[in-house]
Amino acid sequence: MLAEMGWGFTDDEYKADLIVINTCAVREHAELRVLGNVGALTHTKKANAEQKIVLCGCMVQQEHRLEKIRRSFPYVDLVFGPHELWRFPELLEKMYLPHKGRIFEARDIDGERYEGLPVLRAPGVRAWLPIMNGCNNFCSYCVVPYVRGRERSRAPEQVVEEAREVIASGHREIYLLGQNVNSYGRDLGGETDFSALLRELNALDGDFIIRFMTSHPKDASDRLFETMAECEKVERHIHLPFQSGSDRVLRAMNRNYTSEHYYSLIEKARSLMPDIAVTSDVIVGFPGETEEEFEDTLRLVERVRFDMLFTFIYSPRVGTPAAEMPDPYTREEKQLRFDRLLELQNGISEQRQAELVGKTVRVLIDGVGEGSLTARTSCSRLVHVQGGSSLVGRFENVLITESNSWSLKGELT
Ligand code: SAH
Ligand code: SF4
């Protein structure tokens, strides 16, 4: 939108006429960083009186954060929530009207529009493509349903059209995004579903791959795994957050599956695609999680042997049911558990990486790193490869020669 209005980037925050900070509300740490960054802008604003400061994104959709911004940051000129994004040009214009004062627009989602917004894609290998907005699941720890509203799927024709544009502009990887992609289409009257969408995208012409996230275990079906197995452009990788290995905690989280069901999904996926990479999210220190319950999580991690795990310490979110639950464990106790989990997973990641040494894998070369090219395997593992920058954007076969916990080294074959 800004590009269409003639704006461009600067590296110098003192010279910037406009600073826009986009925010995330999922965990407190990110919010505190935003507040710290906004605090630091007193200096730039003092040095440049014409400068305007804009805050947007999910954080400002929360009443207590709006209050904080109103009280503590009088120099923020415009605040708008994710549902007002389509009105950004209008709000910006309003902000520049004389004597308009500060503008706060973070209402509910009525009248929201998300189709037809201008998109400026940075040139590169990967393109993000949202297929839906919002979430209906109300996991008891999570703020997303409150700040993003109910699930709204984009029409399949719109998604396919955008995918065509992305492929035509030379991107090689389409990353489909949604909070729960497995329920894609449910709100469209049952005419389509995520598997049907994958098949449609898979049938498009071009040399590209498709990835997606996030899948919710309660909605991951045999149909999804069969579709993945049959679609050659869909990468053999599933990001399937399990959150906890304890059935009591899963119930308290309102996740609607058991650890046994979760494991059966992994078995099903691996039986159809033995080489599938499995990654996941897990929360340590959910309110009241006991030592024994935490060990259930360790057991599940050992049993599944994830390729990669994103580990989080529980962060209380205002307005969610979990934030009201009794929580006798201290931050230090949670940190110790977190460290144990990380150590276990680091060992598994290292072994999983080492299993690839001596194998030839297909990678997508996606950038130029320090002294080598960077590439990604189907599971998004980082591989360093020697070669010229003209290879960026190409699919190549690579013989893996070395590994550590974080990356692999390979040679073009
Ligand atoms: N829709 C996706 C993920 C959304 S948020 C899903 O359901 O899996 C990404 C991850 O952040 C979650 O999977 C969860 O592990 C973590 N997360 C969400 N809320 C959190 C909280 N309050 N504290 C700590 N981690 C949280
Ligand atoms: Fe949050 Fe659960 Fe929705 Fe994921 S599925 S966004 S964790 S409420």
Image (cartoon, rainbow, N blue to C red):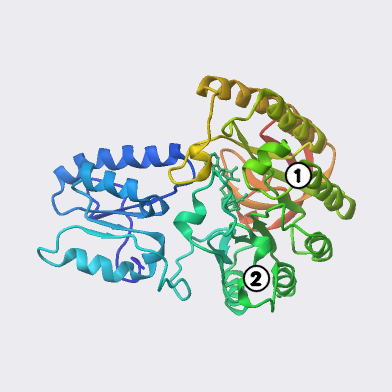
Q: Is residue 175 left or right of residue 321?
A: right
Residue 192 versus residue 132 in the image, above or below:
below
Q: Could you tell me how far apart the alpha carbons at marks 2 and 1 are, in whole angstroms? A: 23 Å
Residue in view at x 62 percent, y 55 percent: 392
Which quadrant holds residue 284? top right
Q: Is mark 1 within 8 Å of ligand 1?
A: no
Residue in view at x 19 percent, y 57 percent: 102
Which quadrant holds residue 185? bottom right
The reply to whether residue 382 is in sight is: no
Question: In the rendered image, which quarter contains the N terminus?
Answer: bottom left
Q: Secondary structure at mark 2?
A: helix
Residue 122 versus residue 320 in the image, above or below:
below
Residue in view at x 66 percent, y 34 percent: 406
The reply to whether residue 323 is in sight is: yes
Q: Which residue is mark 2?
A: 186
Q: Which residue is mark 1?
A: 258
Q: Position of residue 177 (x, y in %)?
A: 59, 60
- Amino acid residing under circle 2: Arg
Residue in view at x 71 percent, y 32 percent: 297
Residue 14 versus residue 103 in the image, above or below:
above
Q: Position of residue 279 (x, y in %)?
A: 70, 44
Instruction: Classify mark 2: residues with Cα within 10 Å, few (<14), some (14-19) or many (20+).
Output: some
Residue 285 versus residue 230 in the image, above or below:
above
Instruction: Classify mark 1: residues with Cα within 10 Å, few (<14), some (14-19) or many (20+).
Output: many
Identify the residue at the far right of this view: 271
Q: Position of residue 100 (x, y in %)?
A: 14, 64
Q: Position of residue 63 (x, y in %)?
A: 34, 50
- Amino acid residing under circle 1: Thr
Counting residues from the start of the chain, the first of labels 2 and 1 encountered is 2
Q: Is residue 172 left or right of residue 335?
A: right
